[in-house]
């Protein structure tokens, strides 16, 4: 990453022209059309220096970490929410070696089929109305069934045995699924339907990032699962990233990792400790550098007051780009590889940072908001959230550059 950024902003002389070239590249690859409805034009115009680099090789590497940890399982690569903010089609391409893709949006699944993707696609929340069932059958989508309402809708459908159902059990998370005591009956009702081709068994772990959670450990969820699924000889699809990484005792015919594929940690250990590489590196540049005197306040609300004379940098990145407004003073930022911190409130288009420890910082400096050199999970923790949210909240505005 740093090598790449170094090429982009090599210095003041040639830097400007390299910067224009770089922006050509960014604009031509951007998923954000400058004129709505028209493709981004390859013009030499100035544009905001905010770029999210998406590292396809890192995503492929992370998929190989899943294989390493679940060598006997098939993999549903979870690509919901626009591939956790990394781009739907880009994620499908990066995880082309996965055995299938899991998502929540039927429109996205249909889009992938229309593009010619033939691998299994699993709708994690199933269907929301019976009108979706013909689409699901036509596009050959696997889907979860988690409620009595869905089951009742399926019972009204007569048709060729095409439907691939993943019956979900609520093993304690109390979000979606049938209670273990009702599971067998739900299974039998599905089994009796002419339209159902196959039934897999599914559950979701609430606390797998903790080895032995006090209230609801994985072992208890598995005990409930085994009880509810007793006697059912069917494929199982149970494991999210944390289960894959921390609970090898859970065997799942298919695993459903999400966050680890994008290089974020599900918790328990750092992404690096799990051998994961960040897929998204959000970088920007300085658009103003100013010296402020002791006692001067910075930004909206004047919440931060300089305790001594300070050099402040204004970075082109704000909450409209997906940077969390909740990020407090002290949230880490990298400037040319050196750690510094956010000061003052995050605004819509900008943040302000302390440049005092980096006197050499200038307009050609590279600012890393998160990614290589600065784990997204660390920034998320400072902002009181998780890496998942930061990735998913990346807005349409940053330019996207694959590398
Ligand atoms: C049903 C289901 N399976 C799998 C996943 C992937 O979880 P993770 O990103 O923690 O691996 C999710 C994510 O929320 C989910 O809702």
Image (cartoon, rainbow, N blue to C red):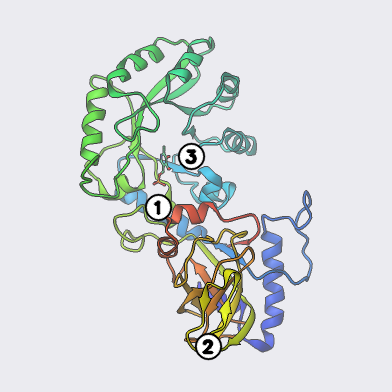
Tell me which corner region of the image, top left, top right, bottom left or bottom right, holds residue 277: bottom left
Q: Nearer the viewer, mark 3 or mark 1?
A: 1
Question: Is 377 situated above or below 247?
Answer: below
Question: Is 28 situated above or below 303?
Answer: above
| Residue placed under numbered mark 3 in the picture | 101
As helix, strand or loop, the secondary structure at mark 1 comes to helix
Say which residue appears at 58% left-offset and 50% top-offset.
87
Say which residue appears at 21% left-offset and 38% top-offset.
219
- The residues bearing labels 3 and 1 have C-alpha atoms spaced at a distance of 14 Å
Q: Nearer the viewer, residue 190 or 384?
A: 384
Numbered mark located on residue 320 in the image: none
Q: Nearer the viewer, residue 212 or 255?
A: 212
Q: Are marks 1 and 2 in contact (CB under 8 Å)?
A: no
| Residue placed under numbered mark 2 in the picture | 294
Q: Could you tell me if residue 2 is visible in this image?
A: no
- Report crowding for label 3: few under 14, some 14 to 19, many 20 or more residues within 10 A (C-alpha): many
Numbered mark located on residue 260 in the image: 1
Disc on the earlier residue, 3 or 1: 3
- The residues bearing labels 1 and 2 have C-alpha atoms spaced at a distance of 44 Å
Name the quarter where the C terminus is drawn. bottom right
Q: Position of residue 347 (x, y in %)?
A: 60, 65
Tell me which corner region of the image, top left, top right, bottom left or bottom right, holds residue 297: bottom right
Question: Is 176 situated above or below 37?
Answer: above
- Ligand 1: does it lie within 8 Å of the C-beta at label 1? yes
Say which residue appears at 36% left-offset and 43% top-offset.
240
Say which residue appears at 50% left-offset and 61% top-offset.
326
Q: Nearer the viewer, residue 232 or 374?
A: 374
């Amino acid at each position: 990453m740093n090598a790449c950024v170094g090429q982009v902003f090599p210095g003041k002389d040639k830097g400007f022209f390299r910067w224009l070239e770089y922006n050509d590249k960014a604009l031509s690859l951007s998923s954000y059309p400058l004129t709505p409805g028209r493709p981004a034009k390859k013009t030499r115009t100035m544009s905001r220096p905010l770029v999210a680099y998406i590292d396809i090789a890192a995503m492929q590497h992370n998929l190989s970490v899943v294989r390493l940890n679940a060598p006997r399982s098939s993999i549903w690569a979870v690509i919901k929410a626009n591939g956790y903010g990394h781009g739907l089609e880009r994620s499908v391409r990066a995880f082309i070696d996965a055995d299938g893709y899991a998502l929540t949006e039927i429109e996205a699944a249909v889009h992938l089929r229309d593009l010619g993707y033939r691998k299994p696609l699993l709708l994690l929340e199933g269907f929301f109305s019976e009108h979706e069932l013909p689409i699901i059958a036509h596009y050959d989508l696997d889907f979860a069934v988690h409620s009595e309402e869905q089951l009742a809708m399926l019972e009204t459908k007569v048709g060729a045995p095409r439907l691939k159902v993943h019956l979900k059990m609520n093993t304690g998370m109390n979000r979606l699924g049938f209670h273990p005591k009702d599971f067998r009956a739900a299974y039998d009702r599905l089994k009796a339907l002419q339209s159902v081709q196959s039934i897999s068994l599914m559950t979701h772990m609430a606390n797998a990032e903790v080895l032995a959670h006090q209230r609801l450990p994985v072992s208890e969820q598995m005990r409930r699962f085994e009880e509810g699924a007793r006697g059912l000889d069917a494929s199982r699809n149970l494991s999210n990233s944390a289960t894959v990484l921390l609970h090898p005792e859970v065997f799942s015919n298919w695993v459903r990792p999400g966050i680890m594929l994008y290089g974020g940690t599900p918790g328990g250990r750092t992404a690096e400790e799990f051998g994961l590489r960040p897929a998204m590196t959000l970088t920007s540049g300085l658009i103003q550098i100013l010296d402020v005197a002791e006692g001067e306040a910075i930004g909206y609300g004047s919440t931060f007051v300089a305790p001594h004379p300070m050099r402040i940098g204004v970075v082109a990145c704000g909450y409209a780009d997906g940077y969390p407004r909740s990020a407090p003073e002290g949230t880490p930022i990298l400037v040319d590889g050196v750690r510094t911190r956010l000061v003052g409130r995050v605004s819509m288009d900008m943040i302000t940072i302390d440049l005092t420890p980096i006197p050499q910082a200038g307009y050609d400096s590279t600012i890393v908001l998160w990614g290589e050199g600065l784990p997204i999970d660390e920034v998320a923790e400072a902002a009181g959230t998780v890496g998942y949210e930061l990735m998913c909240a990346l807005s349409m505005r940053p330019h996207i550059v694959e590398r």
